[in-house]
Amino acid sequence: MSAEQQQWYPSKIDWWLVPVLCVPPVSAVAVCVAFALAGSTPGLLVGAAVAVLVAGLYFGVVFPMRYGLNDTHLIVRSGILRQRIPLAEISDVSPTRNPLSSPALSLDRLRVQFGQGFFKAVMISPADRDRFLNDLAQKAGLRREGDRLSRAVNELLAGESGRAAPGTAPDLAHMRAFPGS
């Protein structure tokens, strides 16, 4: 897929997170300077190693943090990590302030559900939430109500090949409560 067909949305960044994110690299540099002024070569090497480790973590896991949309997928990018979510599997998008770890630099988040279960959801925080929701609704065929997106009920009930659709209860009529009953 060419870059022209993919739209990117940067992560919103909460103001309080900026100083929190600055503490590790500033501390690592301060340690390097302190050891350099003290004339401690081994300490300077340890400080430099810590600074490189912090930079590696930031650029390997945190930056850039952005979200892409193309005609078939939502791409969640966090550093070198990428998650590709088929638009057809997205069943619900809802606002949340859940503080659990996620590829989002803000607590002003959207929870994207793309299957059943806890691990079939991701929390993201696009800076331009309104434009992101409009574009996602249009590309994924979702219905927008305020800051929520959802599939039409008939699409959810149809599912694929008889399976329960995302967000619906599976048919348990054939199961028995106790063996032999």
Image (tube, rainbow, N blue to C red):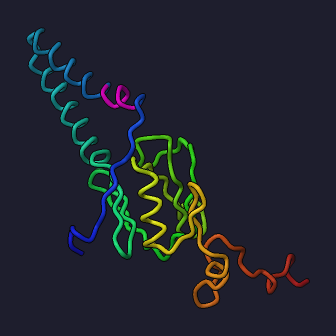
Place of residue 156 in the rendered image (x, y in percent of width and height, measured from the top left): 63, 78
Place of residue 85 in the rendered image (x, y in percent of width and height, measured from the top left): 42, 69
Compared with residue 39, is residue 52 higher up or lower down, i.e. above or below? Answer: below
The answer to which quarter of the image holds residue 163 is bottom right
Camera-side residue: 52 or 152?
A: 152
At horizontal 18% and vertical 35% (from top left) the residue drawn is 52
The answer to which quarter of the image holds residue 106 is top left
Compared with residue 54, is residue 70 higher up or lower down, i.e. above or below? Answer: below
At horizontal 27% and vertical 48% (from top left) the residue drawn is 64
Q: Considering the image in quadrants, where does the C terminus appear?
A: bottom right
The answer to which quarter of the image holds residue 24 is top left
| Residue at the bottom extreme, as displayed | 161
Place of residue 124 in the rendered image (x, y in percent of width and height, measured from the top left): 45, 52
Q: Considering the image in quadrants, where does the N terminus appear?
A: bottom left
Camera-side residue: 141 or 19?
A: 141
**Is residue 176 rendered to the left or right of residue 61?**
right
- The magenta-colored residue range is 17-22
**Is residue 92 rendered to the left or right of residue 4?**
right
| Residue at the top extreme, as displayed | 38
